[in-house]
Image (spheres, coloured by chain):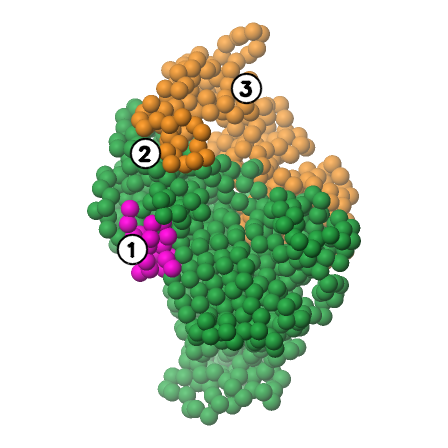
Chain colours: A green, B orange
Amino acid sequence: MATTKLPSSADALLGAAADAAKPPAGMETVTMPYGVPGYTLHDVQRQVPTTEPPVLPVNADLEYIGKSPKRWDAHAKVSGSGRYTADIQLPGMLYAKFVSSNVPHAKVVSIDTSAAEKVPGVKGVFVIENLLGGARLLNPSLEVSKYPIVRYAGQPIAAVAATQPHIAEEAALLVKVQYDAKPFVVDMEMARQSDAPPVFPGPANQGGSAGGGGGARNVPQTGNIHGPAVHKRGDVEQGFKDADFIVESKYTTQVQVHNALETHGVVADWKPDLLTVWASTQGTASVREELASFFKLPKSQVRVITEFMGGGFGAKFGPGNPGVVAAALSKQTGAPVRLMLDRKEEQLSVGNRPSSDQTLKIGAKKDGTLTAIQLISFGTAGCGTGAGCAGPATNLYQSASLHTEENDVFINAGPAAAFRAPGHPQGAFALEQTIDELAEKLNMQPLEFRDKIDTNPVRRVERQIVRESALWKSRNPVPNADRGPIKRGVGLSQSVWYRHIVMDSAAEVRVHRDGSVEVLSAVQDIGTGIKTVMAQILAEQFGVPPQQVSVKIGDTNYPVGPNSGGSVTTASLTPAVRDAAWQAAQKFLVSVAPALGTTPDDLVLTKGEVHSKSGHMQPISFRRAAAKMDTSEVSAQARRIPDYDPKHYDTYGGVDVAEIEVDTEMGIIHVKQFFAVHDCGRPMNPSQVINQINGGLIQGTSFALYENRLIDPTYGLMVNANLDLYKIAGARDIPKLHVQLVESYIAQSSTDASGIGEAAGIISAAAAIGNAFYNATGVRIRSTPMTPSVVLETLSKAPQRSNA
Amino acid sequence: MSGPKFPPQPNDPSSSTPQSSDPAETSQAKERPAAKGITRRGFLKGAGVAAAGTALLEGAQVFTREAAAATRREHDGVKEFGPGAVPVALQVNGKEYTLQIEPRTTLADALRVHMGLTGTKVVCDRGPCSGCTVLMDDMPVNSCMTLAMDAIGHRVTTIEGLQSEGELHPVQAAFVKHDAMQCGFCTPGMVMTCSALLKKNSHPTEDDVRQATAGNLCRCGTYPRIFAATLEAAGVSGKESIRNA
């Protein structure tokens, strides 16, 4: 097995230790690159199965992996030929429309569908009796009702399927729903009061999805307060006694709605022997699993297809109510049924990022050592759970003690869903500003203080890059230094996410006699570019340009793929793809060896050519050799094997610097630019990685300044359930973005790839803007979105703001 | 939305609306007996007024298909079409299409549902996202807010019609080169908007591109690449302003 040529380093002690142990049967010791090129790169030894492909060298020594060939499906996307779920049209297809509740809390007394059924063109009406999503009562007998209790305005109640979309819409209006209204509460502060109307009459729990989210189970529930979920490390009371400085503050963040451009939806085609579902999903596997379970079908009789997918950001796992209802209507009518949500339904019923109300207290010694971190948080995930936001406080910095209490507060609003780095943008907003505040008390600079309390070697490199950047050097360390009404500020924030691996990650690679190669997996490409990365891996193995590789994904007819959430896809799937490609290549050599007059172990396939080790023949091209295969096709399927060193704990993250201007008279924050330094293991396609980081910074800026779900407390209805009043950063709001990728080799798999979706800037953007705001004005801003009214109120409360 | 309106919360101190314990009493149907008097034409005249928008939904069943036989009549010297399907000839991507569609059909639905041209995406269905942008003559329009009948006599160009002889339009090619996309759902609308900009302004600045795409929403956040691609398609060097994007 080949090893890489790497600058060996004296500090490769890790490797030396592993060297001493003899590998067990079926395993071998290999030397792999580890660390950051230019900073900490060295060799380590790992024991890996002998069936693993040769160790990949660093990106600089590769031809296709680690380069940025064009997006594999770019042509389909720019020409409009890519077929998304919303574009599927089948012969005889019906269009379905939900009947949704327009009250926030009620018992449904009766549902009269007779008028709707009589409308010409209506083929089926389905009344929901088993609602998905949100928390569930532990003791259902507390609430006896034929139909699900309405816990939020916009909750689906029934659906109508008709031959035309507008017929379904009109007929849905004719479904008469009789409600027995209950008192409701849509404001988290009011919901926390002891006399608030209860959203649930007793304890209720919610599970997470494949993308994370969901709240703690087995925690106390008092009124609408579900929690606290308590986590302790060490003794915080002692920690605060040991501290020379303590900072304590309260931070609040709003509810953010995902608003993927393609709404949730499916086209379901129920046939006696097969249910086929086209779904806009982040997990073909999760949709298949849950539909099979819901309808008690064998999984082999459910097929899920997601060829192109218009964004999810964490909210699109499982079939959800649209998937279940469309399948039921298809079964009922005997025709394919399309059920895509409209924008209002999307905003109300399929997920959001919970709000937060955090009280964070941190203590440090004079030398900067953290002695205690204490976070008490409340947040609302509507009628669901999952508002915890202690991730950054728990995982970013080393502290002698830690105490976190996370509480979910139920309100009568749509349940939350995992949203890109669940809990982390909220948690980082409070943590990173508090760390800066503490640094000032300690008379330390932000980078210097973080060097003290964060020992992660990759973040250390990232801070060094920031320290040397022109933007950071341009920062005036004295806050509120500008004398005019428009004040410039520069601030930074770190982010952290975690290495999760999904073992349900498999791929098949086929080699054909005409020299074409293809890769198949059920994995879906949610816009991150996994198709391109899979093509690059085959290109590297077979020496074929990536565009000539056939990538067939998004179909459960292929080997199982991971659900795309929590930055798992690239880290989980790419080793399986490479292993399958390697094994297919070995089978290919077996297949061509007789015709080449030699044995398979005399042959090597490298850079698109087949070589004879013994010099038995001149090298010939892969395509010419393929023509000599003894069967028309060879194939290999591989699944993910565990990380090479599963005991080793890796995080991904970055350090992001924001430059802003605060108009202190108008209350407007202009984000001028970000300088963002990020790591994600081996970047498989740097351009696509940077594209995701751009997107994270933009989504984070949008969260920081604009987005806000607003619910009218009088009627309990969301007042901005659209894209005109729900403000999202647009072209004129986009700062300049300068992203620097840090290659970070971790010696964990045959590709050594990691993910970037969560750590891509959404975690740190609001916190960096907050720290820049302080640098600009000398005042802490502790609430998002930082609208002009919040900015002006913040500035007006500041005691020492006078030098303008 | 149909159905009864929920009464204000009894113990909500901020509530000033009269309360009712009987949901049926406050049902919208009872509040709006006038809904039956609304005509399609009346609605179209008042389109854009929020109250009328609600009234349309309430009155929708009034425009039943029984009335569809009377597809056309003269009134006040104004030609009325519908409510039933009428023949409509549209010129899309250089081809003539004759459709049998109801006059209320939007251009987006005509393209997507009736012609199968699904490259045009509907995202918000009311204007602010511009995901459904197509060109009418050379003007970018939101096809979700344009009636198909208003496109009669205009050259409609969709994303499918932007290529010529199999070659990508320079904006499309630049989007590919700069990877100005992630999920791709905003891409057709963005490409149409940016190609329209270049027809009007062959040497745009980055600010011009930002201004042109201000109404186009991209949730993945590919804007820096979109600016770079459009400037490159125009032959304008964007190196200074879009470095590292």
Q: Is residue A710 above or below residue A684?
A: above
In the image, which residues are magenta? A201-228
Judging from the image, mark 2 belongs to the subunit labelled A
Q: Mark 1 points at which residue?
A: A299
Q: What residue type is labelled 3?
A: Gly
- For label 1, the SS is helix
Q: Mark 2 points at which residue?
A: A181
Judging from the image, mark 1 belongs to the subunit labelled A
- For label 2, the SS is strand
In the image shown, does A782 or B211 lie closer to the viewer? A782
In the image shown, does B1 or A738 lie closer to the viewer? B1
> Quick check: is A163 in the magenta stretch?
no
Marks 1 and 3 belong to one chain: no
Q: Which residue is drawn at 37% across and 44% down?
A: A196
Judging from the image, mark 3 belongs to the subunit labelled B
**Foreground label between 1 and 3:** 3
